[in-house]
Amino acid sequence: MKIGIVTWHYNSNYGTLLQAYALQEIIKKFGYSPEFVNFRPNLNTSKKKLVRKLKDLYIMLFRPGLYNNRKLLYRFIDQNFSLGKLYYSYNDLCKEADKIYDVGICGSDQIWSNNTGTINPFYYLDFLDESKRISYASSIGRNRIPDNLVTDFGKYVNKIRYLSIREEKGAEIIKEITGRDAEVVLDPSLLLDKDEWLEKIEDKKPVSPKEKYIFLYILGDNEEHVEYAKQVSKITGLKLIAIETEYGKVKDLELIPADPFDFVELVNNASYVLTDSFHGLAFSINLEKQFAVFKRFRDDEKKSQNSRIYNLLKKTNLEDRLILSDESVSFLSDNIIDYNSVKPLLEEERKRSLEFLSSSIKSVINEK
């Protein structure tokens, strides 16, 4: 049985690629054949290709560290993702998809954020027969759907047969708009447990320092967060390292070139992790690290994505790990996480989430 996955699978973000990879691997474990539905309309004209090349050239010239990371990320995609036929035209995809895919799964990551200001039916599996549609941990990522998009959002969500979402806030929004109950499930990166992730990286060449270190992984451009990390490094005497990201500008720090598996290794071998990223948080918890997470957005910002951070911290009873930049720099050393109490909570959520995904796929297949 072939299962088509719709997510942001061609992306230069570590968490985005790792959640996509994890969902692919879980579906393989279930005994099915997954592939990413390879619809890329952003490459369908010479003008769009030129804009992309010019952007890459700018990054290469002015941010070489980021450019090298992007090359590693895209190589990871080529080596680890099962990609379907490349489509530039949505109409062509609609004509052929039902002949190719027995099941369609959309999710995870913020594919329902509608951050372009429009609803894209692709991310709601509208190219497949309704009976084949499953949403797994799709994320709205924000606190509301814009008024002008509510009708279309409700229309497309109502056509999804088996419906799950990644955050409680997303479930509330769906209930308010459609009246439907969406199952709240784990991000796919958390469906693989610690041992499974470590097995993925056991044969790779290490990139992490030999000495003990603090790993800083930030996506926002906040100098206060960088300064906080430097102060923690100073009082602990631990080396501070970072990965360069598109908006997370980290000056005067050692930057490690990394692909997604290197990212997993850097989190796993760190003494402490400091992050403002949802997936930085997810991997810190999954790999049982001492960590703190910064608030990247103000709660009253329209583009705030804080709900996904709050939701995962709440599920694992780790709300106190959310810190402000004026938090005491001794916070990490003074507040040690006891993972004996966290692991059972995560394992229960993982079991429930896997059951939703497995049973949804089986139901679609058995009713064909």
Image: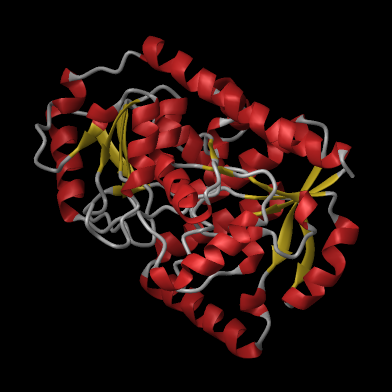
Query: Could you tell whether 337 is left or right of 30 in the image?
Result: left
Q: Nearer the viewer, residue 275 or 173?
A: 173
Q: Nearer the viewer, residue 143 or 248?
A: 143
Seen in the picture, residue 266 relative to 55 is either above or below; the reply is above
Percent x, y of residue 177:
48, 56
Query: Could you tell whether 96 is left or right of 251 in the image?
Result: right
Percent x, y of residue 84:
79, 59
For image coordinates 51% across by 60% down, the residue present is 70
Q: How is the image coloured?
A: secondary structure
> Could you tell me which quadrant the N terminus lies in?
top right
Residue 267 in sight: no
Name the quadrant containing residue 222. bottom left
Q: Residue furthest bottom?
A: 47
For image coordinates 85% across by 71% down, the residue present is 95
Percent x, y of residue 22:
62, 39
Percent x, y of residue 359:
73, 31
Q: Residue furthest front?
A: 179
Query: Could you tell whether 322 is left or right of 331 in the image?
Result: right
Residue 52 in sight: yes
> Could you tell me which quadrant the C terminus lies in?
top right
Name the quadrant containing residue 144. bottom left
